[in-house]
Image (cartoon, rainbow, N blue to C red):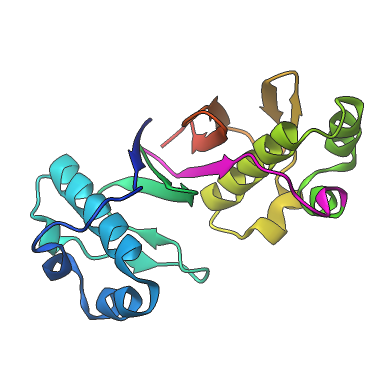
Amino acid sequence: MDYLLYNLSGKKAARGDECLLDADEREQYARRGERYLITRALLKKELARRCGVAPEEIRFSYNEHGKPSFEQQHFNISHSGNLLCMAFHHADIGVDIQQIRPVRRMESLAHRIMSEQQLEIFREQGSRAEDFFTCWSIAEALVKLHAATIWDALRYPFTYKNGRVSTAETLPSVKIHLFTPAEGFCGAIAMRTEA
């Protein structure tokens, strides 16, 4: 497993990046703007480098939730604030980064992503925003690994306490890697340990 981080603040698309997009991606670019183009071009260039093909040859398949995949390389991406993270692995992978910030309705959101056991730990540790966003990153990485959505998070239980995370026995062969993408951010990568 490895990952790349990009600060997109002030970044502009390179000349010719639009040529890397297929027709559907061009529609997305028209709706979502330059950040979409930059992200898609960076991803295609990195996949091309890793797989020995031209970036314009990269064509994605999508699951029912819109998650892209490429048959030659497992990958996942995440955005938060001005940061972009791309993670790569030899098997399924999910990544999430979050900017730590004040949040309203933290307790009700925590109920959507944390098991009762994890909620208890969260409350014991003071219900801090840093712990909330770390748990959110873990939950998001797990659901991305399983090609689901964040609202399926309770199907993938974990515990996070004092900076350490572990998954439930119902998730064999899954490893979680926590990291700090930048000051004021947290991140988690969920990956299969077997191909």
In x, y percent, where is residue 56? Answer: 12, 63
The residue furthest front is 10
Residue depicted at 34% across the width and 70% down the height? 33
Task: Name the residue nearer the viewer: 175 or 194.
Answer: 175
Instruction: Give the answer, above or below, for where 144 lies relative to 63.
Output: above
In x, y percent, where is residue 9? Answer: 35, 48
The answer to whether residue 163 is seen in the rendering is: yes
Horizontal side of residue 161 vs 77, given as left or right: right
In x, y percent, where is residue 186? Answer: 57, 33
Instruction: Give the answer, above or below, for where 121 lies relative to 36.
Output: above
Horizontal side of residue 98 vs 41, given as left or right: right
Dividing the image into 4 quarters, which one contains the N terminus? top left
Task: Name the residue nearer the viewer: 131 or 100.
Answer: 100
* Highlighted magenta segment, given as a residue range: 89-107
Q: How many marks?
A: 0
Instruction: Give the answer, above or below, for where 175 lies relative to 64.
Output: above
**Residue 13 image-quadrant placement:** bottom left
Dividing the image into 4 quarters, which one contains the C terminus? top left
The answer to whether residue 70 is seen in the rendering is: no
In x, y percent, where is residue 81? Answer: 49, 49
Residue depicted at 24% across the width and 51% down the height? 42
Horizontal side of residue 35 vs 156, given as left or right: left
**Residue 170 image-quadrant placement:** top right
Residue depicted at 51% across the width and 36% down the height? 189
Task: Name the residue nearer the viewer: 85 or 169.
Answer: 85
